[in-house]
Structures are given as C-alpha cells and as structure tokens.
C-alpha cells in the first residue's frame, strides 16, 4: 500500500565540525558518482511503499539544480530519495522512522550532492520534478556532500565551501580547479564579454568617437566665430551685433542672447 502524509526530511543539528569518516576517499566520490551537482533543497515530504513496514518509509527532497558537474541533468528540479524520515499523521501523531543515513540536508542552503540513480521513486505526477530521474546519495553519511557557503562551519571556516574529508575552498574558482582533475567533470566556463559588430560596447566606442569629432568641429567653429566677431567690430565700430544662427536648418535672427536645450548622449 502506498501512503502519503505531511512530513519532513530528517535534519541533524551539528555543533562541531566533523569530517566524512566513511570508507570512500574524496577521489572515490568524484569517480563513483553518476551525478554530481550543486543544488538548493526547496521542499520535502515522506512516503511509504507499505505503511505496515517501517523499512519501506522514505524521504523525498526536491532540489533546485543550479550547476551540474557530472551526469545528464538539466537546471530545474530533481528528486532525491533517502531512507526513513519523520511523519506527522492527520490526527496529529508523529512517528520517526530512523535509518542509517546521517547526511545533513538543510533546506534553502546550497550543497554539492554526490548521487546515483535511485531504484525507488514517487509517482512522477506527485513529485513534480523537472528531471525525470530520481536520485539517491552515493553515501548517506555525515559530510558526504560539500556545503557551499557553510553556515554550520565554526570559526574561520564559516561561510566557506567545505565537505567530504576536510576539503576546504575559499572561492568557487578554487573548487573548480580541484574538481577538474577528475574524469567526466565539467565546470562552468568563464563568461568573457566580446565586442562584436552591433554590440553595446562597439556602439559606446563609436558614440565616443563621434562625440570627439563633434567637439573638434565646435571648437573650430567657435574660433572662427570669435575671429569674425572681432573683425565685425573693427569694420563696424559703434553698431549693435545682430546675431544670425542656423539651428536644425532653420535660420534664427535677432539681437540675442539665445539659450537652447540640448540632448544628453545616454552613454556618457
């Protein structure tokens, strides 16, 4: 019998900084995992294949995938199946179904998960995950993942990228450099901004060049106007200057002064 109930995945409080103490090396995690990805747990529930058998109770965590390092996953959501969990029944009774798994899965906190395909899955219509495959942890043990921006790491390690057997990274770039040594691993490429015809950068450059040419012409015209004004006063002493301007191909005449609004180039 298949049972669904309101429930929560197990979360374990940790005050110290333990390390993974299982029988796998850090290299084993990267080499033996079918799927390695960074994700943020966003929801969880529990289900039972047979409500009369404690060993058939499982936890289902929906994880938002943010980066894929190994395996065929797309960004979106994926289901992670773990053994056991805590169930709150409709009548208010609470039952805890313990299991050997000890990995801390913290809601809304990014982690790098090391997984293989799960042979247990909720009906996809109930799971509502974007990826059709359901996963299980390669090892469901303490620190068998990597916390990104670790909030449970004390002292100077707080906020770092940390997990497995005392792997510690200060930045994503350091983490990428480490994992690239393993087969089948892919890391995000650095995004470099290239200047192409019609691109925003080229448009800015061209506008600056046009502006500089415009200013050169304005300075030249101002110099010519200044010389003409001096010559006019010399040739017509005692007369009032009658300005004649052309703006937008329209003649503007009169004694002045004149004030004109001008448009500001959006790139300056």
Image (tube, rainbow, N blue to C red):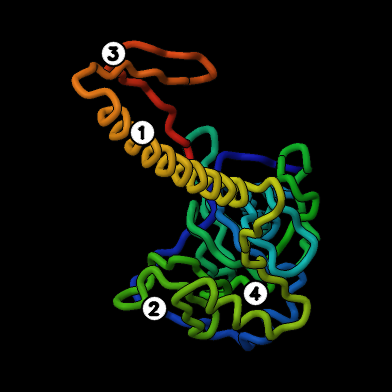
> Does 129 sit above or below residue 160?
above
Q: Write down the residue under mark 3.
A: 255
Q: Which mark's residue is nearer the viewer, 3 or 1?
A: 1
Number of other residues with Cα within 10 Å of mark 3, as a class: few under 14, some 14 to 19, many 20 or more: few
Calculate the distance from the C-alpha at mark 3 to the C-alpha at mark 1: 16 Å
Residue at 68% from the left image edge and 57% from the top image edge? 81
| Nearest to N terminus: mark 3 or mark 2 | 2
- The picture places residue 150, in percent across and down from the top left corner, at 43, 68
Quadrant of the image occupied by residue 128: top right
Quadrant of the image occupied by residue 268: top left
Secondary structure under tag 2 reads loop
Secondary structure under tag 1 reads helix
Q: Say which of 141 and 107 sits in front.
A: 107
Q: Write down the residue under mark 1.
A: 228
Mark 2 touching mark 4, by CB under 8 A? no
Q: Write down the residue under mark 2.
A: 17
Q: Which mark's residue is nearer the viewer, 4 or 3?
A: 3
> Does 230 sit above or below residue 220?
above
Secondary structure under tag 3 reads loop
- The numbered disc on residue 139 is 4
Calculate the distance from the C-alpha at mark 2 to the C-alpha at mark 4: 18 Å
Calculate the distance from the C-alpha at mark 3 to the C-alpha at mark 2: 84 Å
Secondary structure under tag 4 reads loop
From the viewer's perspective, tell me whether residue 182 is left or right of residue 165: right
The answer, for residue 45, to whether it is visible in the render is no
Mark 4 touching mark 3, by CB under 8 A? no
Mark 1 touching mark 2, by CB under 8 A? no
> Does 30 sit above or below residue 77?
below
């Amino acid at each position: 019998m298949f049972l669904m109930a309101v429930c929560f995945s197990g979360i374990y409080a940790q005050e110290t900084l333990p390390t993974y103490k299982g029988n796998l090396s850090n290299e084993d995690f990267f080499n033996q995992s079918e799927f390695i990805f960074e994700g943020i747990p966003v929801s969880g529930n529990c289900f039972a294949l047979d409500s009369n058998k404690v060993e058939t109770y499982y936890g289902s965590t929906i994880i938002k995938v943010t980066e894929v390092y190994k395996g065929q996953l797309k960004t979106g959501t994926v289901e992670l199946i773990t053994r056991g969990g805590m169930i709150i029944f409709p009548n208010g009774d609470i039952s805890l179904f313990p299991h050997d798994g000890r990995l801390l899965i913290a809601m809304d906190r990014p982690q790098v998960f090391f997984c293989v395909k799960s042979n247990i899955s909720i009906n996809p219509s109930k799971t509502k995950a974007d990826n059709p495959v359901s996963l299980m942890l390669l090892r469901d043990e303490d620190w068998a993942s990597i916390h990104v921006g670790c909030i449970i790491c004390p002292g100077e390690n707080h906020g770092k990228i940390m997990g497995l057997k005392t792997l510690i990274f200060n930045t994503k770039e350091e983490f990428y450099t480490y994992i690239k040594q393993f087969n089948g691993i892919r890391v995000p490429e650095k995004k470099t901004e290239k200047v192409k015809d019609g691109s925003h950068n080229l448009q800015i450059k061209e506008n600056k060049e046009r502006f500089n040419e415009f200013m050169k012409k304005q300075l030249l015209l101002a110099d010519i106007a200044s010389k003409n004004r001096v010559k006019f006063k010399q040739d017509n002493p005692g007369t009032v200057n009658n300005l004649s301007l052309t703006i937008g191909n329209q003649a503007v005449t009169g004694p002045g002064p004149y004030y004109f609004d001008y448009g500001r180039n959006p790139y300056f």
